Image (tube, rainbow, N blue to C red):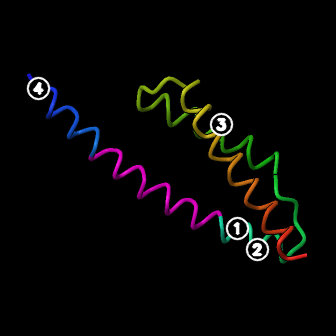
Amino acid sequence: MADLAELRANIDDIDRQLVSLLARRFQCTEEVGKYKERQGLPAQDAVREAQQFQKIEAYARQHGLNTDYAEAIFRHIMDLVIARHIELRAVNK
């Protein structure tokens, strides 16, 4: 059985991986925001969001993650992305 230090070391490693993945995700969404700004597209795409949440729910179920947790986490991430897309639009006006 793992001791507390080992369990926490595992959490630290997972956190490092999560931050790395979030950085990659936000780099991609930054490019999407710039593209949307250039093309005059809205910051938020409700159809795309609905599709994403369906996939996220399926991924959560596959991995035994509470779907409410997954939705809450990704809702916050998407809200940050939308806010950044709005910010890009305002900066470039």
- In percent of width and height, residue 36 lies at 80, 69
Q: Which of disc 1 and disc 3 is earlier in sequence?
A: 1
Residue drawn at (35%, 52%), measured in percent from left and top? 17
User: For numbered disc 2, what is the local secondary structure?
Assistant: helix
Q: Which mark is residue 35?
A: 2
Q: Quadrant of the C terminus?
A: bottom right
- Which one is closest to the eye, mark 2 or mark 4? 4
Check residue 54 in the rendering and tell me which mark sits there, or answer none: 3
Q: Which mark is residue 3?
A: 4
Comparing 91 with 16, the one in front is 91
Q: Find disc 1 in the rendering and name its residue.
A: 32
> What span is colored magenta in the figure?
13-29
- From the viewer's perspective, tell me whether residue 38 is left or right of residue 71: right
User: Residue 56, position in %: x, y?
Assistant: 58, 38
Q: Is residue 23 magenta?
A: yes
Q: Residues within 10 Å of mark 4 (few under 14, many from 20)?
A: few
Q: Nearer the viewer, mark 1 or mark 4?
A: 4
Q: Nearer the viewer, mark 3 or mark 2?
A: 2
Amino acid under label 2? Tyr
Q: Residue at 11%, 26% (x, y): give it.
A: 3
